Image: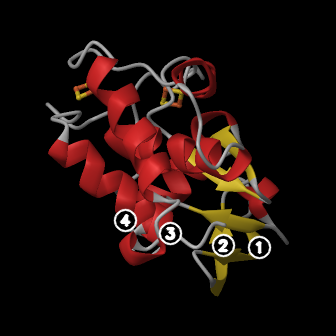
Amino acid sequence: MSAKVDIQFRLNGVDRRVEVPPTMSALTMLRDVLDLTGTKYGCGEGECGACTIRVDGVTLNSCLMFAVDCDGREVVTIEGLVADPAGERLQQKFVEYGAVQCGFCTPGLVVQAHHVLESHPHPGRAEIQRGIEGNLCRCTGYKKIVEAIEDAGKMGSDPKLGGARP
Ligand code: FES
Ligand code: FES
């Protein structure tokens, strides 16, 4: 068995140090080593987006990334968005619009939608559809998901509702 590699990175705002096998995926490290099971294993082949995380501000499929490639980087998972105002708004709107059924795709979609709202504070439907095109949902038919994200964007313009945008 190959030797483990010592890596250090910032995970959801906290410095972490772990030893991982060189071929372990970032997804397996998050779920099986660090017990962050919010990030889901869907296809394992970069097709479904269930494993979406943010690395240095960019969303990636963690099933396609080696854990060792997290070394020195800033990683955010769905757990890191719980207390974030935009993450909170998105989760609230997903529930309100019935955009969650089995919920398997939801963590990846919320991480991706959070990225969409960062890029386009008040996105239209076309921007949302483009933004989440790599995230598959087998239950909702996407309409409610798009509406939830759109409303979360509108809500973000109201400081009373947790939005800080002008
Ligand atoms: S599990 Fe990573 S894209 Fe499907
Ligand atoms: S809610 Fe079931 S896959 Fe999206």
> Can you say whether 18 is above or below 42 in the image?
below
Identify the residue shown where x is 60% and y is 64%: 76
Q: Are marks 3 and 2 in contact (CB under 8 Å)?
A: no
Q: Nearer the viewer, mark 3 or mark 4?
A: 3
- At label 2, the amino acid type is Glu
From the viewer's perspective, tell me whether residue 95 is left or right of residue 128.
left
Residue 66: x and y in percent read 72, 46
Residue 57: x and y in percent read 76, 56
Label 3 vs 2, first from the N-terminus: 2
Specify the label residue 163 is tagged with.
3
Q: Residues within 10 Å of mark 3 (few under 14, many from 20)?
A: some
Label 2 vs 1, first from the N-terminus: 1
Specify the label residue 7 is tagged with.
1
Identify the residue shown where x is 60% and y is 23%: 46
- At label 3, the amino acid type is Gly
Q: Nearer the viewer, mark 1 or mark 3?
A: 3
In the foreground, 164 or 102: 164
Q: Secondary structure at mark 1?
A: strand
Residue 56: name its quadrant.
bottom right
Q: Are marks 2 and 4 in contact (CB under 8 Å)?
A: no
Toward the right, the furthest residue is 72
In the foreground, 119 or 33: 119
- At label 1, the amino acid type is Ile
Report the residue marked by disc 2. Answer: 19
Q: Residues within 10 Å of mark 2 (few under 14, many from 20)?
A: some
Measured in 3D between alpha carbons, the distance from the residue under mark 2 to the one under mark 4, in whole angstroms, is 32 Å
Residue 73: x and y in percent read 81, 67
The answer to whether residue 86 is seen in the rendering is yes
From the viewer's perspective, tell me whether residue 33 is left or right of residue 67.
left
Q: Nearer the viewer, mark 2 or mark 1?
A: 1
Report the residue marked by disc 4. Answer: 88
